[in-house]
Image (spheres, helix red, strand yellow):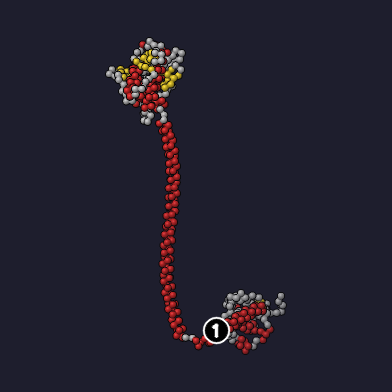
Amino acid sequence: MVDDKISINFACQRCLQPIVLDDSFENISIHDHAELALPIFSNTAPEIDTQDENSYDHFIPPYMTDSINGNNGFMVVSDGRENQTLSSALKVKADLFDFLSSNSEIDHPLCDECADSLLELMDRQLKIAESELEDYKIYLKKLESSEENLDLDELQKELTDLDEEEKRLLDELSKLRTNEESIKASIKFREEEKSQLDEQEATYWREYTKHRRDLMCTEDDKRSLECQIVHGQNQLDKLKKTNVFNVTFHIWHHGHFGTINNFRLGRLSSAPVDWSEINAAWGQTALLLCALARKVNLTFKRYKIVPYGNHSYVEVLGEGKELPLYGTGGFKFFWDTKFDAAMVAFLDCLSQFKEEVEKGDTGFCLPYKMDKGKIEDSSTGNSYSIKIQFNSEEQWTKALKFMLTNLKWGVAWVSSQFTEEKLETPKV
């Protein structure tokens, strides 16, 4: 802590700590002051490296005499006496420090520690300067010793060559700069082209993704169609192997009844069959015989069978008469001969089909003979009338069953002859 009796008027220009001046500064004469005000070194003196880590922070210090006038806000530390101004001695000290600061790169005053640091810095720079001086002396001696061997013409020529080389390099540098500008312009153009290509690539990928999705959907549809084709081909092969007539007209038997497509044809007292079922069976039978005749290109003589469901009929050619292949039942039925005539006409048409087939195939033979409305069982020799009048229901039902059996044989022959052809499904 500074003694209260010691007057402190200045601060260190580096660390800004207050400093106490030596007593010798109190006894500076006018002549000494003038001598100290002389320049310390010339303007050509080497500069102190202020970038050294121990160098001072360089700034242009304000003159202490200016702070006495209060122009720049620089305040000299006061000694605490408010009623006294700066004495002439203090002004002399301030002028002295200003002279020192203006003649060097070091701001004054300095404290002991900062002054010691400055001295160390200057010592290092002095050693560096002395080392450089020794190097220059050695180089000077080498030059002096080799001066006799120097050839000025050769040196001048070398200098000329170097000038030409410099000019050539400058020309090359100019060309390189021109080339650089051209390359920069080319790079800019390529960058713009790259930007356009990037946009085109993005557009391409969007279109590719869309087309890829469409391709996947198309491939799915293609696989689906292939599966459908395979399924259709399997169905076609199955249909090719299928007997269309047997599928369309299934002739079988049910007890004493012959059946076509599960419709019973005939009546028994023990098993009465509704007439609507009998009429439907006759409709299927008429449709079957027409389909067989169309398959062998047969046109019936004297009659024309007209399939019309459960109201089918036989038309007598040349007379315009229609014979119904259906019955209504009841008492009056037994006195109606048209139904019997229609069944006899149908049996005649079946005989014509048999004769037409025998023309092309002499080996063809039906199991039951048919003649004038009767069917004969060759195994027993018994004949059964297809008429319902003056006939029992059992014999009429058996005659119908034999007729369906003959039709089934006709279906088998037609199927065997046209297995390679597409069998036409008969139309109702």
Residue 72 in view here: no
Disc 1 element: helix
Residue 258 in picture, x, y percent from top left: 42, 19
Query: Where is the N terminus found, in terms of image quarters?
Result: bottom right
Residue 374 in picture, x, y percent from top left: 36, 14
Q: As drawn, which residue projects farthest toward the top?
A: 390
Q: Residue at x 60, y 80 (%)?
A: 128
Q: Residue at x 30, y 19 (%)?
A: 302
Residues 25 and 65: in front is: 25
Q: As drawn, which residue projects farthest toward the left?
A: 318
Residue 325 drawn above or below residue 144: above
> For the residue carrying disc 1, how many other residues have a C-alpha within 10 Å: few (<14), some (14-19), or many (20+)?
few
Residues 325 and 358: in front is: 358
Q: As drawn, which residue projects farthest toward the bottom?
A: 31
Query: Where is the C terminus found, in terms of image quarters?
Result: top left
Residues 335 and 355: in front is: 355
Residue 47 in picture, x, y percent from top left: 57, 80
Q: Amino acid at mark 1?
A: Tyr
Is 187 situated left or right of 92 in this image? left
Is 158 situated left or right of 51 in this image? left
Tag 1 residue = 139
Q: Quadrant of residue 404?
A: top left
Residue 335 in picture, x, y percent from top left: 36, 11
Q: Residue at x 43, y 70 (%)?
A: 176
Residue 50 drawn above or below residue 227: below
Is 184 situated left or right of 116 in this image? left
Q: Residue at x 47, y 86 (%)?
A: 151
Residue 49 in view here: yes
